[in-house]
Amino acid sequence: MSLVENTFMSFLSQIVAEERIRQDMEKGGFDNLEGMGKPLKPDEAQHLPPELRLAYRMLKSGGFVPPALAEEQEINRTIDLLAGMEDEGERYRQMHKLHVMIMKMNEGRGRAVNLEASDDYYRRIVEKVRIAEDRFKKDV
């Protein structure tokens, strides 16, 4: 197809699409849509350059997350795992794993990991692990 034919076909398909939208609007096809009258959700990719936004959305919808977010999710999963753990030895190992993950994340970010939502919980876990560590050392 030549450039002229491509341009004409593109123009023609745009006219057809606009006509179908106009007909649907007249029939009320856009009335009572979900979220009608409500503000749009903020664009989560607005901080990215426009040329990267589509790729970001495609990766996100495919279940891929940035490495920093994956690390943070792993830290949160480990904290949740510690909550239900009864074996003191395993709890100690998981707490050590958590400590290493946080240190790695701090190094990569150049700043401390923010655990605000679970600060009190994290403090209690550390306290329990220290008690377990003391017991573990006494038993050895």
Image (spheres, grey):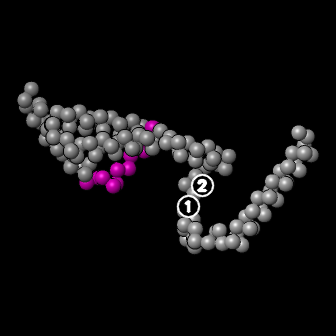
Residue 85, given in percent of the width and then of the height, sits at 19, 41
Residue 15, given in percent of the width and then of the height, sits at 82, 59
Residue under the point 17% across and 33% down: 89
* Picture mark count: 2
| Residue matched to label 2 | 46
Mark 1 neighbour density, 10 Å: few (under 14) some (14–19) many (20 or more) = few
Q: Quadrant of residue 88?
A: top left
* Residue 66 vertical placement versus 118 (above, below): above
Q: Quadrant of residue 6?
A: top right
Quadrant for the C terminus, please.
Answer: top left
Q: Are marks 2 and 1 in contact (CB under 8 Å)?
A: yes
The span shown in magenta is 108-120
Is residue 94 found left or right of 19 in the rendered image? left
Q: For residue 26: magenta? A: no
The secondary element bearing badge 2 is classed as loop
- Residue 126 can be seen in this image: no
* Residue 138 vertical placement versus 37 (above, below): above
Q: Which mark is residue 105?
A: none
Residue under the point 30% across and 52% down: 118
| Residue matched to label 1 | 42
Mark 2 neighbour density, 10 Å: few (under 14) some (14–19) many (20 or more) = few
Q: For residue 110: magenta? A: yes
Please name whichever residue, 114 or 3, is drawn nearer the observer in this view of the structure. Answer: 3
Q: Quadrant of residue 56?
A: top right
* Residue 40 vertical placement versus 51 (above, below): below
* Residue 33 vertical placement versus 88 (above, below): below
Residue 110, given in percent of the width and then of the height, sits at 45, 41
Q: Could you give the CA–CA distance between mark 2 and mark 1, rounded to whole angstroms? A: 8 Å
Residue that sits furthest to the top in the current view? 140
Is residue 88 found left or right of 54 in the rendered image? left
Please name whichever residue, 75 or 59, is drawn nearer the observer in this view of the structure. Answer: 59
